[in-house]
Image (cartoon, rainbow, N blue to C red):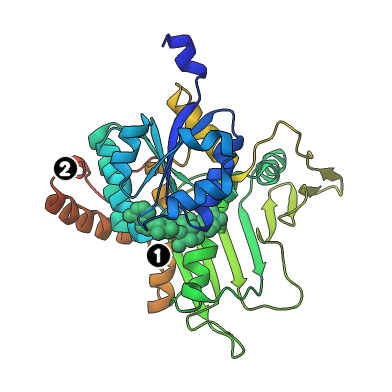
Amino acid sequence: MSAEQQAVAPVEVVVVGAGGMGRAWIGTVLKAPEARLVGVVDVVDGAAERAVEDLVPAAERASIATGTDMVEVARCAGAEAVIDVTIPAAHHPVTADALHAGLPVLGEKPCAATLAEAVSLAGHAEATGTLFMVSQSRRNNPHLREARHLAEELGGAGIVDTQFSRAPRFGGFREEMAHPLIVDMAIHAFDAGRVLVDGSPVQVTATSYNPSWSWYEGDAAATVTITYDSGAVHTYSGSWCAPGRETSWNGEWTLSCPRGTVAWDGDTPPSARSEDGTDLSGRAPSEADRWELDASLAEFCAALRGGPVPASEVHGNVWTQAIVEAAVRSADTGRTVALAEVLDEALAQARTLDAADGRSRALEAWTSGTSGLAAG
Ligand SMILES: NC(=O)c1ccc[n+]([C@@H]2O[C@H](COP(=O)([O-])OP(=O)(O)OC[C@H]3O[C@@H](n4cnc5c(N)ncnc54)[C@H](O)[C@@H]3O)[C@@H](O)[C@H]2O)c1
C-alpha cells in the first residue's frame, strides 16, 4: 500500500468486550468512514458472535473474525488497532497485551480500574511506543467547546461550577459501590472541566453523602472542589437520587470570567452575558461536527494516520482519574488531597506491578507521579 493510500485507508479495528457499551462501539465503527470492523472479542463464549449477528448487516458478517482471545482474533483478522470496551478490571491486562502485540488501543473510560494501573499503562505505552488513547466521550461535545470559546471571549473561565441532579434506577453494581456518583458519573464532569480551564489540577476537597431516601448503598451525592495550578477552580455538586427537577446528563454549567458569565444547560448551545449586559449566543453545531464516541474514534484514527496526539492520550487522561481518586480519598478522610500525593503513591504501586509483569521498565525514568504526565 502506498503512503498516500495508507493516509486515507480506514483503520481496521477489533472491538474487545461485547457488552452494552461494546455494542454501541460496534455501531459507531460500522458508521465511521475512518474505521472498518474486522473482529469482535468477548471473554464469554458466544457473546462476540451474538453481537455480530445482532448488529452487523448479513452481507458483511463473513469478513468479521470473532472469538475469546484478543491477540489471536486481531492477528487472524489482520487488525491494526483495538477498541477496549471491557469492564474496568480488564482494562489493564487487555490494553497492555494489545500494546505489546503492537496494536494501538482506544480504551473506554476509566483508563483502568485503579490509578496505579492507569499509570502502569502510561508506562506500557512508552515501553512499546504505541498509542493508547482513552475515550472520555462526554468531552467530545461541540457545546462544551463552544462554552470554552465564549469564556475565552470574556477573558477565560476562572471559576467553573457544575450542578448535576438525576434519579436513575440502574440496579446492579452502581447501587453497591461505595462512591457511585464520584467514580462512575462525576468523572465525566471532572474531565469536561479540564476542557474548560487552563492548567493542571493540583488538589481536591470533597464531601460525599447519601440522602435518607437513597436507593444506593454507597454515597449517591457529593460536593467536590478541584483547584488548578492556573488559579482556576471547578466546583461540582451532584446527586444520583434527586427526583423532580433533573438536570441534563451533562449537568448545568456556569463559567465565571473576568468580563462576564457563560451558562450551559448541558443539552443546547451555551450562551453568555458580558459585564455590560450584552448577550452572546453560542454557535449551534453544524452537520460536520463529530460527537461523543464517533469523535473519539475519528481523533484516534487521525492520530494513527499522522495526525496530532489526542488530548486524551493516556499521559493526558491520567489526570482525570487522579481527580477521581483524590476526591474519593478526600470524602473518606475529610481532608484536602493533593494530586501529587495520589500520583506518587500510584507510581510506586505501578512500578511494583510492572516489575512482576516484566514487560515495561519505562516508569523507572519518572522522577515523580506527575513528572511523566502530559501538561494538564
Ligand atoms: N462513555 C460512557 O458514557 C460509558 C457508558 C457506559 C459504560 N462505559 C464504560 O464502558 C466499559 C464497558 O461497560 P459496559 O457497560 O459495556 O459493561 P458490560 O459489563 O455490559 O460489558 C463488558 C463486556 O466485557 C466483557 N469482558 C470482560 N473481561 C473481558 C476480557 N478480559 N476480554 C474480553 N472481554 C471481556 C464481558 O464479558 C462483557 O461482555 C466500562 O469501562 C464502562 O465504564 C462508558
Q: Position of residue 151 (x, y in %)?
A: 69, 44
Residue 298 is tagged as none
Q: Is residue 68 visible?
A: yes
The amino acid beneath tag 1 is Ala
Rendered residue at 57%/58% (across/down): 189
How many numbered discs sit on the rendered protein? 2
- Most extreme residue toward the bottom is 212
What kind of element bears circle 2?
loop
Q: The C terminus lies in which quarter of the figure?
A: top left
User: Mark 1 — residue?
Assistant: 326
- Residue 47 appears in which quarter of the rendering? bottom left
Q: Position of residue 100 (x, y in %)?
A: 24, 38
Alpha-carbon distance for marks 1 and 2? 28 Å
Nearer the observer, disc 1 or disc 2? 2
Q: Ligand 1: which quarter?
A: bottom left
Q: Is residue 70 above or below residue 177?
A: above
Q: Position of residue 125 (x, y in %)?
A: 30, 38
Residue in front for this viewpoint, 231 or 286: 286
The amino acid beneath tag 2 is Arg
Q: Earlier in the sequence, mark 1 or mark 2?
A: 1
Residue in front for this viewpoint, 19 or 117: 19
Residue 359 is tagged as 2
Rendered residue at 49%/52% (across/down): 50
Q: Is residue 197 visible?
A: no
- Residue 285 appears in which quarter of the rendering? top right
**With 316 as the anchor, is 126 left or right in this view?**
left
What kind of element bears circle 1?
helix
Label 1 C-beta lies within 8 Å of the nearest ligand 1 atom: no
**With 76 as the anchor, is 220 left or right in this view?**
right
Rendered residue at 37%/42% (across/down): 315
Q: Position of residue 1 (x, y in %)?
A: 41, 11
